[in-house]
Amino acid sequence: MLFSFFPSAHQHACARKQQERQSKIDSLPAIYSAPLSLLEEKIHALSISQLVSQCRSGTISPSAIMLAYAKKTLVAQRATNCVSDIMFQEALLIPPVANWGLGVDLDAGINEAARERSLLGVPVSIKDTVNIQGHDSTIGYSKNVGKPSASSSAIVRLLQDAGALVHVKTTVPAGLLAIETASDVFGRTDNPYNPDFTVGASTGGGGALLACGGSKIEIGTDIAGSVRIPAHFCGIWSLKASSGRFPSWGTESSMAGLESVPIITSPMAGSLVDLRDFWKRVIACEPWQYDHTCVPLPWKDVNLRDEGRKLKWGIVWEDGLIPPTPACKRALSIVIAALKKQGHEVVDFHPPNVWDGLKIGYQLLFSDGQQIKNALSPGEKVNMAAMAILDLLHLPRLMKRILAYFTGADDAASSELLEIMHTKSVLEDRQNVVARDAYRAEWHRKWVEEGLDFVLTVPISFPAIEHGASEKTTLICAGYTFLFSLLDYPAGVLPVTNVDKELDNLPEDFVDSDQFKSYPAVAKTAYSVYDAAKMHGLPLGVQVVGRRFEEEKVLEGMQVIEDALHQQGSVFVNAVNL
């Protein structure tokens, strides 16, 4: 009992990390706490292309850019708690930046695009899990505090060679698998639109920072929507690539070694123009020279607008488990109406059974059942949504079979989850990989038969949810994003509109309706967190999906949607005002 009065190793590590972060902030010169000057406001408004051009011409300096974005970052940190580490001064010391304007020749081993400093002066934030030499990659675990990475990841090395300002790392939830960004290590990250709501996960800190204007680009990771859900919740843009297209080597994971559902390093941005330009500049730097896992696939310009061809869009309305709430369904409907007005063909797409695919995916994702739990320090916990899955995995199989038997008649989905959610033998895991490949082949067949250019769907059934509500929505609500990770399709998210308390209300008698009564138990419980009045003003996005390695086409499809929305007068506006 005596020792309970003293902080545990876990508590000590968390306090150390937060004190270290605050000390770095407190040690900054007073000018970092001043409001942006008029010149800094103008710098902050520049696109990536303009930043690079003016920086390379000598019109503005990297240090001036860094000061403007550092100020924004500190404002974002005070408002949302989105930052895990500060590197403002360090960002200016890398040779391509430190030698700005001197015309010195850079390392001859660097490819031409990097030698030309194609990202010079672009502020880029990095998710906590992406290795930067000399800095922690904690994965939200206290055991990883004070264990700086020995080397930088492929994407960080590429960025620094190209002159980017890698200025900050951003917060994640413990163990990453979450819909909310909160941990004992970093604390809770709040949504910049409403602090009572979450930013999503696991790249939640980066989502909040971008929405607040503290970075141009966030480098995140995605296995089940970890850059797409924060983009939807925070009103920003993101694109998850196919495996091998974007440099991922040197990124830490709570599920190291998992290959059956690829973990993809992915960028997020504050505008579609910047997202596309960044993608193009990274590919021009030949990431396969930095990362042996990258496919040597150069950038291919796609301009569907100049071609004038009308495109075919397939709509997936539901994942077979949790239907979209009225707000998210309305955002998707707005996009459909805008595309139809431009003469595009928009059809309901009936792919291979989505729920069947998700069941395969969940078994692959949680086949081990131990990695996340084993990484926790005594006294440390993951979020309640992840804990519910871990507890289910460790419930005795006989008990789960009994529960499945008694729930099967009234709730088939819950019964099926009880049957399949257990740790797998090597043989069972390989059988699920075979089932995954067959499912992917069936999707390919259906897509080709329908002649689709894109698939459109919601990113998740809900707008941003209140803190703590993911225990009710559960991780299962991420099916709309997880599906395309399972398929290894590129998928982007762009903001469309905002929740409207008048337009997006559920009918007063909804819980008594036949529609609601037909929902599985997991959907009924999830819907209990939906409140359009409380959610009023939160961003709403849509998800745009292409076939494997069609990243350029997906970015172009996102632009087609934005152009169609603009032409009907529907323009998303970042309403964050800090």
Image (cartoon, rainbow, N blue to C red):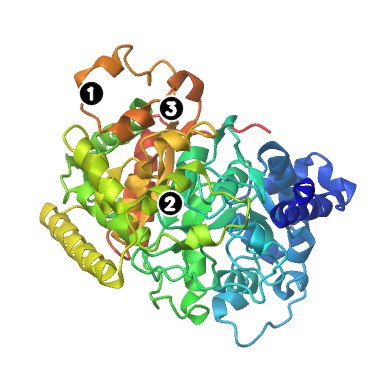
> Type of residue at label 1?
Lys
**Residue at 65% over, 62% down:** 143
In the picture of the structure, the residue carrying the numbered disc 3 is: 529
The residue lying at 34 percent from left, 26 percent from top is 326
Say which label, 2 or 3, has the lower sequence index. Answer: 2
Judge depth for marks 1 and 2 and give the one in front. Answer: 2
Residue 135 visible to an observer of this rendering? yes
Q: In which quarter of the image is residue 100?
A: bottom right
Q: Distance between the residues labelled 2 and 3?
A: 22 Å
- Label 1 CA crowd tier, 10 Å (few <14, some 14–19, many 20+): few
Mark sitting on residue 517: 1
Q: Mark 2 points at which residue?
A: 390
- The Cα atoms of the two marked residues, 1 and 3, are separated by 17 Å
The tag earlier along the polypeptide, 1 or 3, is 1
Q: Which amino acid does label 2 sit on?
A: Leu
Under tag 2, what secondary structure?
Answer: helix
